[in-house]
Image (cartoon, helix red, strand yellow):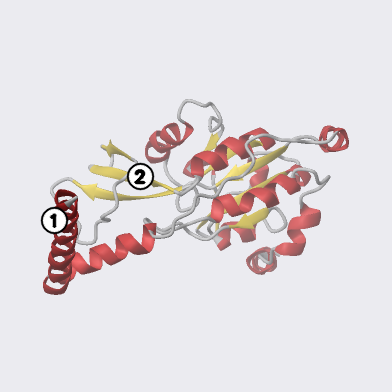
Amino acid sequence: MPLKSESLLVYFFGVATMGLVMSMICVVVPPVRLYLAKIYKIYADYTPIIYPSDDQLTPVSKRRLNLVGKKTLVLDMDETLMTSWMKKHGKDPKNRPTIPHDFKFYLPEYGATVFVYKRPYLDHFLDRVSKWYDLTVFTAGVEAYASPILDFLDRGRGILTKRLYRHDCIDVFGLRAKYVTLASPDLSNVLLLDNSSTECSFNAGNSIHIKSYQIGSRDEALINLLPFLDALRFTKDVRSVLQRCTRFEGLTTFLERVTQ
């Protein structure tokens, strides 16, 4: 019994000493304190969010899907599915992220290494929506940059094979417009998910705006969209819903007036 009491005393003394040392380090070295605070802010009280992995549809719901047909979901890439930064050869950026990257590759055209960060819940999001929609990725990035990233995000699943790049965009007064009709001519059955309000305005009534993803943020935007996208696939015309909940007509109306 005395031996057990001595062991407990040594254990608590060690824990107290370690806590005291860490407290002194945080007080004396501000960068350490800031780094620990950042880690705590990101990971403390973190609870994973899940969405049902299998469709449990009633016979009525299955018949409805057969009637309306499968729709096309056009996905933007940068700051919607992922974000990245470049490190040019021989240069060390000052504000480089401290969070580990998910993927990197060398881009000889720019003489730079590209570091890629997936948006939280991306894999689960793609697994679900690929069963509900025909997926097309439409990015304003050049093919040499975007293709390796999309190959990585696809992970051999064959769900991101339909791709449109910068050369597929349409120039509208110096802006690169990603019209969804390039992915599917039927406007009743196609929609765009993009972080750019400008791109959404080019596709008013056929677009969903999502906030831009920032590296290291506790982002839940993709997982929060799943219930809405799940319900939207049952509509006969996506515009009957999206025209009610999006307001991106301003730029489109202005451009129409200019061209008249």
Residue sitting at x 12%, y 65%? 21
Q: Residue furthest bottom?
A: 27
Residue sitting at x 48%, y 57%? 219
Image location (x, y in percent) of residue 178: 58, 49
Image location (x, y in percent) of residue 195: 53, 57
In this view of the protein, which residue sits in the foreground, 240 or 260?
Answer: 240
SS at circle 2: strand
SS at circle 1: helix
* Mark 2 surroundings: few (<14), some (14-19) or many (≥20) residues within 10 A: many
Judge from the rendering whether residue 40 lies leftward or rightward of residue 19; answer left or right.
right
Look at label 2 and name its amino acid: Val
| Real-space Cα separation, disc 2 to disc 1, in angstroms | 46 Å
Residue sitting at x 43%, y 31%? 151
**Residue 31 falls in image quadrant:** bottom left
Image location (x, y in percent) of residue 86: 28, 49
Judge from the rendering whether residue 2 lies leftward or rightward of residue 137; answer left or right.
left
Q: Is residue 161 visible?
A: yes
Vertical position of residue 212 compared to residue 64: above or below: below
Q: State the residue position of label 2.
A: 116
Residue sitting at x 24%, y 68%? 34
**Residue 57 falls in image quadrant:** top right
Image location (x, y in percent) of residue 143: 42, 37
